Image (cartoon, helix red, strand yellow):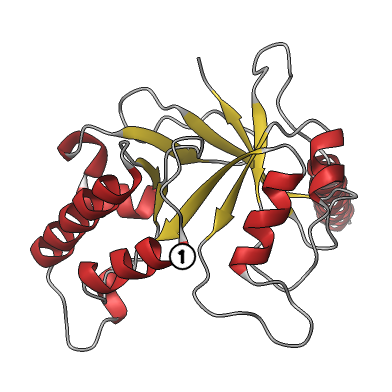
Amino acid sequence: MARKRTASVRKSSRGATRRWMLRGFALVGLVAFAFAAWLWWDMRDWHPDETLYPEQGAVAPAGTAVVKFETLKAIGAQFAYIPLVAEPFVNGGIAFSERFRRAREAGLQVGVVLEFDPCARADVQSGAFAQMVPRDADLLPPAIGLARLADGCAPAVSDAAVESELMTLINQIEMHAGKPVILKLAPAFEARHRTATALGRDLWLIRDRARPDYAGRPWLLWSANSQRMTAASEEPIEWVVVQK
């Protein structure tokens, strides 16, 4: 009889332990969910402290939403980079040239960012840039976005060919712009090509909220919030700061 009572007590104790463990896991999950929800909400309008980074700006979204550049300036942007989009949008969207013009009229410093396509020849990409972007000393240095890898190219493109075409593109754009480019370098592209070490150009790094360090050397621009929600656009704005 004593053995039965002992076994029953042990079984009850194990059951209570399991219940407390389940409650603990549930509490941890609830705290994690609450923190994730707070972080998501906080990031909607977060940007780095202006006392640490007095020069701040934005990348205009490449979608079809209208961007109110005057509002963008009013909330603290001093400059705007406009993604180069070769064709006008349909369904009421705004073409590159129109966004470029509106940003300048709003009194913002303006630059252009061209997303590098590793599957396309440099001549084609630099030709589009030269056709659409005026030679103007008042423009910010042009930026080349380095995010896309050549894994999906058909026919296949080697890493050596990607790096060669990128160098050609840089030279051609710099010749047109009359100033060095800025390399907007994504972590995956840097991990594959080690561009920060190979090319001596100013860097533009990308990491939400936390200062980026994946390039192994100092950066000039930091995309600190890729999804900032503002009154300037219905689409999220990529918020950028300058490091002095």
Q: Quadrant of residue 49?
A: top right
Relative to 165, is 232 above or below?
above
Residue at 80 percent across and 37 percent down: it is 73
Question: Mark 1 belongs to which amino acid?
Answer: Met
Residue 107 shown left or right of residue 117 in the figure: right
Q: Nearer the viewer, residue 90 or 9?
A: 90
Whether 141 is drawn above or below 216: the answer is below
Residue that lies at the very extreme toward the top in this rendered image: 51
Q: Secondary structure at mark 1?
A: helix
Q: Position of residue 110 (x, y in %)?
A: 59, 42
Residue 28 location, x and y as percent? 80, 44
Taking the image as shown, residue 226 lies to the left or right of residue 50, namely left
Left or right? Give the position of 185 relative to 77.
left
Question: In this orientation, does residue 235 appear?
Answer: yes
Viewer-side residue, 171 vs 213: 171
Which residue appears at 78% of the width and 69% of the height? 65
Q: Residue at x 79, y 30 (%)?
A: 76
Seen at 73% across and 34% down, the residue is 77
Q: Residues within 10 Å of mark 1 (few under 14, many from 20)?
A: some
